[in-house]
Image (cartoon, rainbow, N blue to C red):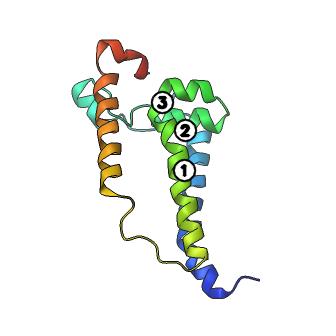
Amino acid sequence: MLQSSTVGRLAAPAGVLLLAVTVVGYVGAIDPNESGHYPTCPFLALTGYQCPGCGSLRTIHALAHGHVREAFGLNVFAVAMIPLLAFFWVRWTIARARNRPTRTKAADPRWIWVLFGAIMIFWLVRNLPFGSFLAA
């Protein structure tokens, strides 16, 4: 049986999971492909170029309906990040359940810079003519 202190320690990971499930449920129910439901990306509206997150709502909608191939076509980077986010959430939840200290840093700064670089390269390439297949 779980002690009340364990339940308290798991409150934050449970809240994040509830928020994620709520967001996926909402985006799965309210189609972002229909105009008027969500605002346009400000970067896209100002520049005409897609940001790294453009297509993410449509990607989540496609995944919520089991359309994995379509999701990859909309934003491959967002699809690739889901397992990474899930890994960090599971690691955090296990640490909280075992009452182990959680890191003060999310990851080694070098990995954060690698991720930042990958995002910047994805952003650049998807807006170049030869990378148009990344911009849906």
The residue labelled by disc 2 is 60
Q: In which quarter of the image is residue 41?
A: top left
Q: Determine whether, in the image, residue 3 is placed left or right of residue 91.
A: right
The amino acid sitting under disc 1 is: Val
Mark 1–mark 2 Cα distance, whole angstroms, equals 9 Å
Q: Determine whether, in the image, residue 87 is placed left or right of residue 56.
A: right
- Closer to the camera in the image, 16 or 118: 118
The residue labelled by disc 3 is 76
Badge number at residue 23: 1
Q: In which quarter of the image is the N terminus?
A: bottom right
- Closer to the camera in the image, 36 or 29: 29
Q: Residue at x 61, y 86 (%)?
A: 5
Tell me residue 61's x, y (percent).
Answer: 57, 36
Tell me residue 116's x, y (percent).
Answer: 31, 44
Mark 3–mark 1 Cα distance, whole angstroms, equals 19 Å
Crowding near the residue tagged with mark 1, few <14, some 14–19, many ≥20 C-alpha atoms within 10 Å:
some
Q: Quadrant of the C terminus?
A: top left
The amino acid sitting under disc 2 is: Ile
Q: Which residue is drawn at 33% across and 38% down?
A: 119
Q: Which residue is drawn at 34% across and 30% down?
A: 122
Badge number at residue 98: none
Tell me residue 100's x, y (percent).
Answer: 52, 78
Answer with mark 3 or mark 1, whichever residue precedes in sequence: 1
